[in-house]
């Protein structure tokens, strides 16, 4: 008797569900035919490995591909929430039934029996915003399953094959492929070890939960004042000579949730660090405190400071004290705009802005601090496009990011701070059930989960905006503002492809920004246009799926690509709550107003890319064809057919003048600024006379930025335990970072920001942390009789 599970699919799904699922994934990534490969090879650069390109083109996301199969099964069984798996299975069952097939495919043939090309066309039609669907939720499924397949496939691919095919010169600290030769000096941390203990206990003056941008600054200051400091982090230290790591290893060792976390509805990818040093290890060295560098202004966005002072009653943000904190943290890390050599992407932003009359700024880098043996006044070039895999130690003198593990944490160590890695702080300990006085933290150490209590006079929570509120909630604190007001700076990318090589791994990732769209509603909400780190797996994560062939071709065009994005200073926040395992669940809906502003910023970005000569402009949205400067004859024919169809349906084709429902000419300026939600788009800029591009912009403007068709991401989580001066009515901490109503408990990280800061947050977070711990020093040092070390 033939087995009804001939491929030995695991029991997490039924064999029929697996069969249908692989019928979907193998249509999303299917092999090129020999003819297609031969045609493609003629266009390949001579220095790229044809063998790797061929293997890449033959890849298929099917159960016959062992790497993909293992990774997909693992993801479904171990990683995805049960509710998501159930939602996928619901659609798989429909696709395996006659009525479901009729509904979704207009055919009686079960989906998995259709040929690959037909299955692929069906998925394309589900994603097409203009296609008529009897079951519209299939759009959400199509976006989710194409994203999942693309992610699982690229992350499980043979890296040597993948990198060889796209022409990416991998650089790792430990591997033989290191491009920079010997590493420079770096600080070797010692960590407390509890592997032989059954249970541990420690005492100190201050325990700091989290060693990232907020926690590291706090540790350095408090230890240097003679206090006994213990810093814990649930992440682990990766020595700098091993950095950068290979991409997949970096995701696993340096990021929260293997860099695959999302908001509860799956719409926004959440990028946050989880390693000793936190965001300071993986971030991109952009060190903005000023709106306009190069001019006299060195202040955090002036309007944000004013908003925090006025709206949140926090006058400190307009004081010299705050400016001193900003300057102090910038000085320690050697923040400088000197020595910057802009790479292709950053130069694109600067040149495009100049041509279009958009404002732009140079973004300083935290790379100038001196190392032992350096000459005084050394100017470093931070030529490291591998930052998000961990910024390594670099050769002496050629620059590296002076992040947390090269500055604050060594300072803290040298002043006597003790460190514990791989420690998950579970709850705050209180002196009584009333929870009005914190006396330490309780948690577990290492994979063995050794219970460990740390008793302290002060507890400083610096676990970042996703985890700090969870620690408070797990501890039983009930202020209803905990977790609320989470800001994400939601961002959307545009990939651009240029005729010339861009060598996307070269240079510092973020040295320029366009500020033209920062105030789109009159209340300083809007987008900053910047460029991203560009590892091949990062790119694979943000490319929309248009078809199997198009995805493969686009990925292979890596060496000519550039990744750009807008970060939105948003009006409407979301919130963090706890799931049953005590981990964060992020609920966040991008408001209509914010979506409109993101759209406006992206149109501006597309224009920058156009005037800089991009051949192809591909926003991270589904259902919109990319703009191609030189389309093929077939593509142009299709465009013309669409133009005629549109003209016919609007009535313009027959009647000449304006179409039905149109009350403005295409080229009439539509740049109106209002309050939230009334930002509209300026389609015409000097220098852009290309009618085809104008038409594409108009389509993009009409396309919308709904979560079901847009790839959103956030690397800037803020505000989930916000600061206020209202006794806790609308805030979690007071103006010195003290949790309202709990003695001895403070928060010093991005979660205390009163709202979105509108700039890349590292410097702001560090400055606020410096201010908060200044208060702790003032309180504890007198108790310690002048700060002598115990
Ligand atoms: C990829 C990326 C690129 C970025 N680029 C820039 C940039 O170029 N410029 C810029 O200004 N900003 C940048 N940022 C943002 C910046 O790094 C963050 O805003 C900043 O790190 C936030 O500091 P934090 O202290 O709040 O949290 P983090 O720096 O994230 O530190 C939190 C730490 O707490 C630990 N932790 C969490 N929960 C627990 C627990 N229960 N027990 C123990 N430890 C715990 C985590 O492991 C982590 O190490 C970037 C962020 C990312 C992710």
Image (cartoon, grey):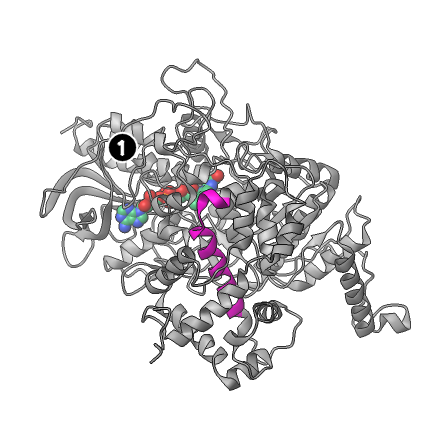
The outermost residue toward the front is: 1
What residue do we see at 17% from left, 31% from top? 784
Q: Residue at x 67, y 52 (%)?
A: 603
Picture quadrant where residue 127 is located: bottom right
Depth check: give the residue in front, 773 or 173.
Answer: 173
Height in image: 655 above or below 219? below
Q: Position of residue 97 (x, y in %)?
A: 48, 83
Q: What residue do we see at 15% from left, 59% from top?
A: 433
Task: Let me know if residue 566 is in the magenta part.
Answer: no
Point out residue 764 in the picture as x, y percentages from the top left corner. 44, 39
Query: Is residue 155 located in the magenta-colored stretch of the structure?
Result: yes
Report the magenta residues as a range. 140-162
Disc 1 secondary structure class: helix
Badge 1 is on which residue? 222
- In the rendered view, would you say 365 is above or below 422? above
Near mark 1 (Cα within 10 A), the count class, few <14, some 14-19 or many ≥20, is: many
Q: Nearer the viewer, residue 156 or 41?
A: 41
Locate residue 35 relative to residue 424 in the image: left or right. Answer: right
Image-quarter location of ligand 1? top left
Q: Is residue 725 visible?
A: no
Residue 630 x, y percent position in the rendering = 76, 50
What residue is rendered at 41% in x and 35% in y? 244
Name the foreground residue: 443 vs 745. Answer: 443
């Amino acid at each position: 008797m033939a087995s009804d599970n001939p491929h030995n699919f695991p029991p997490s799904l039924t064999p029929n569900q697996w069969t249908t699922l692989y019928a979907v994934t193998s249509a999303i990534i299917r092999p090129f035919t020999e003819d297609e490969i031969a045609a493609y090879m003629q266009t390949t650069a001579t220095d790229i490995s044809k063998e790797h390109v061929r293997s890449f083109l033959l890849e298929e996301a099917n159960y016959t591909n062992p790497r993909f199969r293992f990774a997909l099964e693992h993801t479904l069984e171990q990683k995805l929430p049960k509710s998501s798996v159930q939602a996928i299975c619901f659609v798989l069952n429909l696709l395996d039934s006659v009525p479901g097939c009729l509904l979704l495919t207009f055919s009686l043939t079960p989906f998995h029996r259709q040929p690959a090309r037909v299955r692929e066309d069906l998925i394309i039609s589900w994603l097409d915003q203009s296609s008529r669907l009897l079951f519209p939720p299939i759009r959400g499924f199509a976006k989710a399953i194409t994203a999942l397949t693309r992610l699982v496939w690229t992350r499980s691919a043979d890296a040597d094959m993948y990198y060889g095919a796209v022409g990416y010169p991998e650089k790792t600290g430990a591997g033989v492929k290191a491009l920079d030769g010997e590493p420079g000096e770096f600080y070797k941390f010692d960590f407390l070890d509890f592997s032989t203990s059954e249970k541990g206990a420690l005492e100190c003056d201050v325990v700091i939960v989290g060693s990232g941008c907020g926690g590291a600054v706090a540790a350095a200051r408090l230890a240097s004042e003679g206090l006994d400091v213990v810093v814990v982090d649930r992440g682990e230290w990766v020595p700098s000579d091993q950095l950068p790591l290979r991409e997949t290893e970096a995701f696993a060792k340096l990021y929260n949730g293997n860099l695959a976390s999302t908001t509860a509805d799956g719409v926004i990818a959440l990028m946050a660090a989880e390693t000793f040093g936190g965001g300071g290890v993986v971030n991109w060295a952009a060190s903005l405190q000023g709106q306009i560098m190069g001019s006299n202004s060195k202040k955090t966005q002036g309007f944000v400071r004013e908003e925090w002072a006025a709206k949140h009653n926090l006058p400190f943000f307009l004081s010299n004290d705050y400016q001193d904190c900003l300057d102090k943290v910038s000085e320690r890390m050697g923040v400088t705009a000197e020595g910057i050599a802009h790479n292709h992407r950053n130069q694109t932003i600067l040149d495009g802005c100049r041509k279009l009359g958009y404002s732009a700024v140079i973004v300083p880098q935290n790379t100038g601090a001196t190392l032992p043996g350096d000459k005084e006044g050394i100017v470093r070039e931070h030529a490291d496009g591998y930052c998000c895999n961990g910024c390594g130690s670099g050769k002496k003198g050629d620059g590296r990011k002076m992040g947390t593990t090269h500055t604050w944490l060594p300072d803290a160590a040298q002043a006597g701070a003790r460190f514990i890695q791989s420690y998950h702080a579970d709850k705050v300990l209180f002196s009584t059930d009333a929870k009005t006085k914190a006396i330490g933290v309780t948690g577990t150490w290492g994979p063995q989960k050794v219970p460990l209590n740390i008793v302290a006079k002060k507890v400083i929570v610096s676990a970042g905006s996703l985890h700090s509120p969870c620690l408070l909630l797990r501890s039983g604190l009930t202020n209803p503002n905990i977790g609320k007001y989470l800001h994400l700076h939601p961002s959307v990318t545009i990939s651009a492809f240029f005729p010339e090589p861009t060598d996307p791994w070269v240079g510092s990732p973020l040295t320029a920004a366009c500020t033209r769209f920062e105030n789109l509603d009159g209340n300083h909400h809007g987008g900053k246009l910047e460029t991203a780190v560009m590892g091949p797996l990062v790119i694979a994560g943000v490319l929309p799926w248009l078809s199997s062939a198009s995805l493969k071709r686009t990925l292979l065009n890596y060496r000519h690509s550039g990744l750009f994005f807008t970060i939105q200073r948003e009006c409407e926040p979301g919130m963090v709550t706890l799931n049953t395992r005590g981990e964060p669940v992020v609920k966040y809906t991008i408001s209509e107003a914010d979506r409109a502003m993101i759209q406006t910023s992206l149109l501006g970005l597309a224009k920058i890319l156009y005037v800089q000569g991009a051949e192809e402009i591909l926003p991270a949205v589904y259902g919109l064809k990319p703009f191609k400067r030189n389309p093929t004859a077939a593509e142009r024919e299709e465009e013309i057919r669409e133009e005629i169809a549109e003209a016919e349906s609007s009535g313009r084709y027959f009647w000449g003048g304006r179409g039905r429902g149109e009350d403005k000419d295409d080229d009439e300026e539509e740049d109106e600024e209002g309050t939230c939600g009334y930002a509209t788009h300026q389609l015409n800029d000097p220098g852009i006379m290309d009618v085809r591009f104008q038409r594409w912009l108009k389509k993009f403007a009409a396309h919308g930025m709904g979560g079901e068709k847009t790839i959103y991401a956030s690397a800037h989580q803020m505000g989930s335990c916000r600061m206020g001066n209202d006794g806790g009515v609308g805030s979690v901490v007071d103006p010195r970072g003290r949790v309202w109503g709990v003695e001895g408990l403070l928060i010093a990280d991005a979660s205390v920001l009163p709202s979105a800061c509108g700039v890349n947050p590292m410097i702001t977070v560090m400055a606020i942390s410096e201010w908060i711990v200044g208060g702790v020093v003032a309180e504890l040092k007198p108790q310690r009789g002048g700060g002598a070390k115990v």
